Amino acid sequence: MRDTAALILADTLAAILIGHAEPEVAAITARHATGGVPLLGSRAAAPPPMAAFLTGLAGTAVELDEGNYAAGGHPAIHAIAPTLAEVAARPTSGRALLEAVIAGYEAGSRVGHATRLRPAAHPHGTWGTIGAAAAVARLRGHDAARTEAALEIAASLGLATSATASLRGGSVRNVYAGAAAQNGMLAVDLAEAGITGEPGGIAAVFGAVIGEGFDTAAYAASAGRAFIAEPFLKIASCCRETQGALEAIEALLPLDPLVDLLAIQAIEVETFASAALLAERAPVAPIAGRFSIPFTIATRIVQGHAWIEAFSPAAIADPRARALAARVTVREDAALTARLPAERVCRLRLTLADGTVRQVEVINTPGDPGRPHPEGAMREKFRRCVEPSHGAGWARLWDLALGIDGVADTGALFAAFRP
């Protein structure tokens, strides 16, 4: 489990570092980095709660952070962002840092697993406050009772997030995890100051306010499950639910890599309900492109990859990609929805102008718990994120992150990742 946790940490650190290069992240960092603790992956410093916010924002800015199906969201960034802010203020050992990340990941995942969120709610920024508070409480040495008090406060500090913001081009969605990290840290501060939360606040908020139900039996049964051993990890800069279609088109392209874009008459995608929502053909912004199956397929064909640049403003505006995306249709197949959660299926049918039809079915996606990426693929992702700012030093940082258990002083982590 600790090896997987270290891999998730390394992967998230890379996402944070490359996220700081995004213009919006750089701009808000410049505004709020007024001094304080160092920000990992930046030359700036900010007060600890703001450091947690900026780190969470950077970590989700290019849609490369990990997720967890059983938790129903992305627990790592919610736990790691406040952990980094806390250890920047109070340096400790790498072992303590990793244990805090695990504690936060598990606490948030347990609540996410037991919560039935309202359909209009995005999971980012909701139960992530629980994970953030648990991570900080662990670092501060709080016992079970004091930690529970902080979590009850954190339950009331989650966001009412919109699942459709990203689909409509609202990059405010990238703010959700940062705000939850900041509020989780604040929850621990409030508990230490004597502020109290609602007794049973977790079930109250996630069962009736943000969520439509909270399964107390599932919550109790998940104690000790080790959710952190079940992540999904991505090597493409887009929403996980686009990546079944992405793998399907990858499987077809080698058959004729030189096929003229104009020869593609239509692409039809059948998949499960939540993925079928990502059907926008004309995304208005990079984040909307990352949450669009038609555009993800189109930009992959046009750009030759689905890395960060494939979702840049210029790529979003590329008339070739937009014309191709207009020829992609996405629909739900209820039979595929019924196969969840055991199987996440995507069927893709490619029709060429000459009448040739090629089709493929993908069951689950590389990077899923049952189909983990080989270490070489994760190392290459890390290189692509870190090399632009650190050159050949990226390999040393990869080893440092994976070996976090042996780091005596977390200050070395911030020094090493400083651009």
Image (cartoon, grey):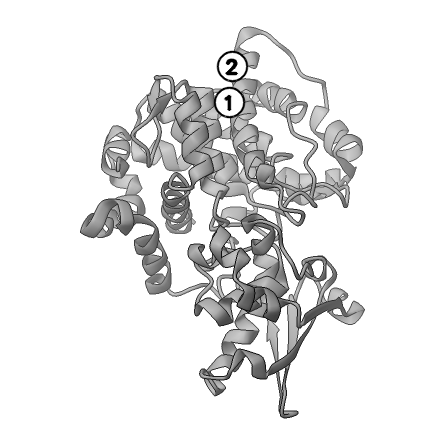
Tag of residue 199: none
Q: Residue at x 38, y 41 (%)?
A: 21
Asked whether disc 2 touches disc 1, contact meaning CB atoms under 8 Å apart, the reply is yes
Real-space CA distance between mark 2 and mark 1, rounded to the nearest whole angstrom:
7 Å
Tag of residue 185: 1
Q: Residue at x 32, y 33 (%)?
A: 42
Using the rendered view, name the quadrant where residue 379 is placed. Answer: bottom left
Rendered location of residue 416, percent (x, y): 23, 37
Determine the secondary structure under disc 2: helix
Rendered location of residue 414, percent (x, y): 28, 32
Determine the secondary structure under disc 1: helix
Tag of residue 189: 2
Rendered location of residue 287, percent (x, y): 56, 49
Q: From what the image shows, is residue 145 above or below residue 82?
A: above
Rendered location of residue 401, percent (x, y): 30, 44
What is the three-letter code of the residue carrying label 1?
Answer: Met
Q: Which is more toward the observer, 148 or 70?
A: 70
Q: Residue at x 69, y 28 (%)?
A: 202
Q: From what the image shows, is residue 154 above or below residue 303?
A: above
Using the rendered view, name the quadrant where residue 273 is placed. Answer: bottom right
Q: Which is more toward the observer, 96 or 259?
A: 259
